[in-house]
Image: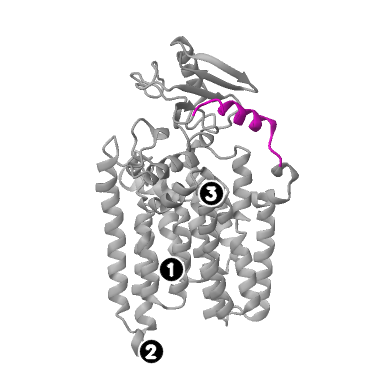
Amino acid sequence: MYTLVSVLRNDRLLNAGYDLGIFEQAIRAYAHGEAPVVELKGPGFNLLGDHFHPVLALIAPLYRLFPSAVTLLVVQAALMALACLPLTRWAHRAVGPATGLAVGCALGASWGLVAGVTKDFHEICFAVPLLAFSVTALGQRRWWAAAAWALPLLLVKEDLGLTLAAIGGYIAWQGPRERQAQPAGKRRFPLLLGAAVALIGVAGTAVEILVLLPAVNPRGGFDYWQQMPGRTSSAGGPAGLLSLGLHLFWPPMKWLLLFMLAAPTAFLGLRSPLTLLCVPTLAWRLLAGNEHYWQPNFHYNAILMPLVFAGLIDVLHRRPAIVPPRRRRKALAFSAAFTAVTVAVYPLHDLVLPSAWRTPAHVRTAKRLLARIPDGATVASSNRLAPLLTGRTTVSLVCFGTGPDPAAPTALPAAPPDWVVSDRHDPTVKTPCPVAQTHRMLRLYRTHGYVQVAEEDGITLLRRG
């Protein structure tokens, strides 16, 4: 289902250069033994200077066999689906088959996973199953297995080292309390293990953000510092702390996000300490100045879904006194009802919509015009058209140029592209390409001798003269 709905959306141009095209360019480079240079991010931009995700190289062999953006979508769907396995098995064995069925379906159709799997491609698809297996091991008090599943998070994204540290803290906190109940063969110093895992997590994030990313980044720094907690506030001292505290829960969109995270588990997951593992990711998101981090319809929530459902299973398993059978049935019924409502809102419902199975005329026109661009060419493209080209050409954004102000280019790129294609109906009108900047660059290309090959249904195709 994940694969089907994501491919159907991709066929209707609902993905974009940011981010599917970016990741395809990186994985295509890995597949050919090259550094992950991504022209969609800028001339010669090494993607390991944007986020630290060397785990993407694992997809390279498969991409070499099947060089297409669809390969990325299929891998993402498989990894997201895999995350449902350990939690469903844990619920089945610990609470019963009915609970296992309810939890498995609710997790699989949860709004966070669906939003993550149906919108472009992102590296966090590797983190979702790693966290699912790790948090299941935590719930089953298998401390070494939990640590082993969590350690690769350092290779997925730089901020996930903080989640690894939280897992280490959980082991150090809960391990000694459970030690006396464990068989002699399993008493393996959980306090020391937890402390070591926490230290590795914090140190790993620090090294990646302060050393590795700046070393590769063309600007010599970490591009997201300005979005980190406190960077959006100019006040200092007590006033700055008060402003930061108020910013944590305002605007109201953040309350909606917290409600959406707690509701799939009928709010019972909040009674488990496993849910605290959400704190590192939620903290930097709620404190950051980028409003995209606060919204429920972005991929950032996918990694939280296994954690909140693990909290639900943990409560049902270890605290039966507060969840007797009658209350458990009500909680599972609420979870199922909430999931059904979100399925009607989020893209999984595409599978029953006739329009989702038809290719719009605009998309057919775009594919026909882009077929005129030969393989291996360099192309400046608008955002939504880029994924149709990243597998066979070198693609940059149509709004990229040069001049004293990068936000208002006054000259062509240093290496002018062979082709230029722009879609007037592209809905991404602000980021990454503002409309005015796109129009300015199209005028520059025409002024410098680019010949219009076609203009149809709002799509303009220019060739270098």
Going from the N terminus, do you reach mark 2 or mark 1 first?
1
Can residue 434 be seen from the camera position used here? yes
| Residue position for label 2 | 183
Q: Where 18 sits versus 262, above or below?
A: above
Amino acid at circle 1: Ser
Rendered image: mark on residue 134: 1
Q: Give the secondary structure at mark 1.
A: helix
Residue extending furthest right? 354
Residue 370 covered by magenta stretch: yes
Going from the N terminus, do you reach mark 1 or mark 3 first?
3
Q: Where 352 sits versus 99, above or below?
A: above
Rendered image: mark on residue 73: 3
Residue 457 image point, x, y percent: 65, 23
Left or right for 34, reference 272: left
Going from the N terminus, do you reach mark 2 or mark 3 first?
3
Rendered image: mark on residue 165: none
Amino acid at circle 2: Pro
Residue 378 image point, x, y percent: 43, 27
Quadrant of the image containing the N terminus: bottom right
Bounds of the magenta segment: 358-374
- Counting every numbered tag in the picture gives 3
Q: Quadrant of residue 264?
A: bottom right
Please name the residue shown 50% across and 26% down the image. Answer: 434
Residue 312 image point, x, y percent: 55, 70
Please name the residue shown 55% across and 21% down the image. Answer: 461
Alpha carbon distance from label 2 to label 1: 21 Å
Q: Give the secondary structure at mark 3.
A: helix
Residue 174 image point, x, y percent: 38, 76
